[in-house]
Image: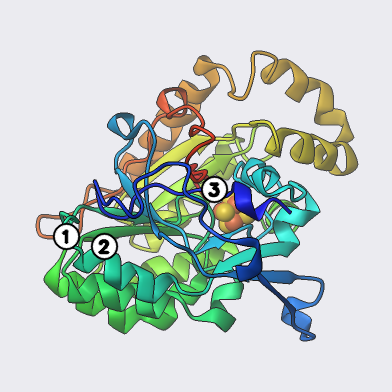
Amino acid sequence: MRWDNLTADSGAPGDSEHSRADVALFGADAVTTRTFDTPEFRGITFHEVRARSIINRVPGASRMPFEWTVNPYRGCTHACVYCFARKTHSYLDLDTGLGFDSQIVVKVNAPELLRRQLASRRWRGEHIAMGTNVDCYQRAEGRYRLMPGILAALRDQANPFSILTKGTLILRDLDLLTQAAEVTDVGISVSVGFVDPELWRTVEPGTPAPERRLDVVRALGERGIGCGVLMAPVIPFLSDHPAQLRATVRAIAEAGATSVTPLTLHLRPGAREWFMAWLGRHHPHLVRRYERLYAEGAYAPKWYQRRITRQVHDLAREYGIGPARAGMPRRIHPPEPDTAAPHPASTSEPVQLTLL
Ligand code: SF4
């Protein structure tokens, strides 16, 4: 594994200790590899590292809704077949298929490092986005418990932040989230692309069921923390039937989501090969249709994306999903796929929006 290939940007703008884009994030000797013989973690290898920097600057941030991210993990046991963060595993010489699902990098010092970097005089208290590369509430978080320390550090500095997740584990930290929301701007989004149980079991095999994720939306709402839903991905020919869109938007509305933002599946290198192999196994009759729909590259044609967006917005209006009320935490607006930043330069830690 090319641990010495991992690099990071500065935790505080201009911080000379960390601002060189080519500073190695981990030394090879800082990696401890662990496995746990419990049913939950069987077959999963954890690579514990001590990161040198934890706040990453998003390359091309001017086109992003945020500039800074914190990602305590790399790889994701939620194992969504379509996950386009898969590609980032190749920068570690790790496999982007099964390896992405089962070889998890854990930045074990993330909480203490974040607290230190937030306290730096050079840090200007800007918004920090989490869950933008891989899910910070994936199963590993149940064991490593990095998020409570991270949330406490953000709360103590009253630093605004947002989280995008598929993990119900976020409810463990409800008290911390509530405390943080009392002192700063907190935005939470949950990702629910569809509510079809069969599709969920095969395409998002490691995630909590969509209904359980919607329970998160409900629970946050009961605490006064508005929660949006990123309806992602809408999967062509598998979750885009009008009846499926309706069932999903209705369930999102019933959960009390403050917003719904649809996003059509995109298939970047790394995800594309893995997804198409899955499609061939589970829905072979769709392979040719996908090859045609994604013939131009990673994105479905604009007419298709617009159609989905219009349908979902119409349904959202029908079911009364509205913008966040005054005084509620701000919503997260993910970028339109065709305006997303290009892949980060190889000299900075890979930061991608997986749009969970
Ligand atoms: S899409 Fe999100 S939850 Fe799914 S594997 Fe990727 S990072 Fe994890």
The CA span between labels 2 and 3 is: 19 Å
- Tell me the tag on residue 193: 3
Q: Residues within 10 Å of mark 1 (few under 14, many from 20)?
A: some
Image coordinates of residue 8 in percent, x first then y, are 45, 49
Question: Which kind of residue does numbered mark 1 sit on?
Answer: Met
Label 2 beta carbon less than 8 Å to ligand 1? no
Name the residue nearer the viewer: 240 or 180.
180
Sequence-wise, which precedes: disc 1 or disc 2? Answer: 2
Sequence-wise, which precedes: disc 3 or disc 1? Answer: 3
Name the residue nearer the viewer: 315 or 234.
234
At x 17%, y 55%, the residue is: 122
The CA span between labels 1 and 2 is: 6 Å
- The quadrant in which residue 257 appears is bottom left
Q: Looking at the image, in which quadrant does ligand 1 appear?
A: bottom right
Residues under numbered marks 3 and 1 in contact, where contact means CB atoms less than 8 Å apart: no
At x 60%, y 69%, the residue is: 30
- Tell me the tag on residue 226: 2
- The quadrant in which residue 182 appears is bottom left
Where disc 1 sits, the SS reads loop
160 sits left or right of 86 in the view: left
Name the residue nearer the viewer: 324 or 133.
133
Residues under numbered marks 1 and 2 in contact, where contact means CB atoms less than 8 Å apart: yes
Name above or below for residue 288 compared with residue 239. above
Q: Residues within 10 Å of mark 3 (few under 14, many from 20)?
A: many
- Label 1: which residue? 328
Image coordinates of residue 100 in percent, x first then y, are 71, 54
The CA span between labels 3 and 1 is: 24 Å
